[in-house]
């Protein structure tokens, strides 16, 4: 089998955090390019629409031709196979991520045994962050600058201001 020059980095990205950005940058040390795949079908109820999540991630990497961002729906392994690669990239923050990631990697392998999941460690600076904890802080006016890209910070403020106005 041929080796793969690019990996697919899937997630909900609701929204993309500095941890995701750092992981993609690490991934680029290993792969020539990365496709960020923003999931429509996710077990979560996202704050941002699929279009908003894709648009924000695209803006974050607008100056990097080695990173592209797309939406996907349906089974991840089918999407990966359609792209002609066999590599799913995922990040691990702490031991707590391991169980879920292990489950997902094994399920994906059962669904398509030619597809491999490659894990990279998250930079220690982002070990404690998650999209949920960032949203929780931003919702009640906490300053989340730095833990998300600047443009995401602005979009979070705008989103919560809109939601507050609507109630
Ligand atoms: N630094 C900081 N935080 C990180 C991180 C990093 N490097 N990597 C992930 N996280 C956080 C995210 O912020 C997110 O936080 P949250 O749970 O508070 O939202 C969490 O870790 C994981 O999010 P993410 O990386 O976006 O992935 P996900 O678990 O939301 O993605 C899919 C799951 C989309 C990959 C999975 O549901 C899927 O493949 N869906 C398609 C349908 C399918 O094929 N299902 C079968 C799968 S077996």
Image: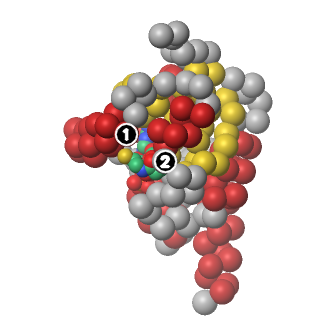
In front of the other: 117 or 162: 117
Whether residue 92 appears in this view of the structure is: no
Residue 71 in the image: above or below residue 135: above
- Does residue 14 appear to the left or right of 132 in the view shown? right
Q: Which mark is residue 75?
A: 2
Residue pointed to by mark 1: 111
Instruction: State the image quarter where residue 62 is shown.
Output: top right
Give the image location of residue 4, x and y in percent: 54, 15
The residue tagged with tag 2: helix, strand or loop? Answer: loop
**Circles 1 and 2: CB distance less than 8 Å?**
yes
Q: Residues within 10 Å of mark 2 (few under 14, many from 20)?
A: few
Q: Which mark is residue 72?
A: none
- Does residue 100 appear to the left or right of 113 in the view shown? left
In front of the other: 97 or 76: 76
Q: Which sits earlier in the primary sequence, circle 1 or circle 2?
A: 2
Instruction: State the image quarter where residue 7 is shown.
Output: top right
- Does residue 146 appear to the left or right of 110 in the view shown? right
The residue tagged with tag 1: helix, strand or loop? Answer: helix
Give the image location of residue 102, x and y in percent: 26, 38
- Residue at position x 52%, y 9% in the image: 2
The CA span between labels 1 and 2 is 9 Å
Type of colouring: secondary structure
The mark tally for this picture is 2
In front of the other: 141 or 120: 120
Give the quarter of the figure containing the C terminus: bottom right
| Some atom of ligand 1 lies within 8 Å of the CB belonging to the residue at label 2 | yes
């Amino acid at each position: 089998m041929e080796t793969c020059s690019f990996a697919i980095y899937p997630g909900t990205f609701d929204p993309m955090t500095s941890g995701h950005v750092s992981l993609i940058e690490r991934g680029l040390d290993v792969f020539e390019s990365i496709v960020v795949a923003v999931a429509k079908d996710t077990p979560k109820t996202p704050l941002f629409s699929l279009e908003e999540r894709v648009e924000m991630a695209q803006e974050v990497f607008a100056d990097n031709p080695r990173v592209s961002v797309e939406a996907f729906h349906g089974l991840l392994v089918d999407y990966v196979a359609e792209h002609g690669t066999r590599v799913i990239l995922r990040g691990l923050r702490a031991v707590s991520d391991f169980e879920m990631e292990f489950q997902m990697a094994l399920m994906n392998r059962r669904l398509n045994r030619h597809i491999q999941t490659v894990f990279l460690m998250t930079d220690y600076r982002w070990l404690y962050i998650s999209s949920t904890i960032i949203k929780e802080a931003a919702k009640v006016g906490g300053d989340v600058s730095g833990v998300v890209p600047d443009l995401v910070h602005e979009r979070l403020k705008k989103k919560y201001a809109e939601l507050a106005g609507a109630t």
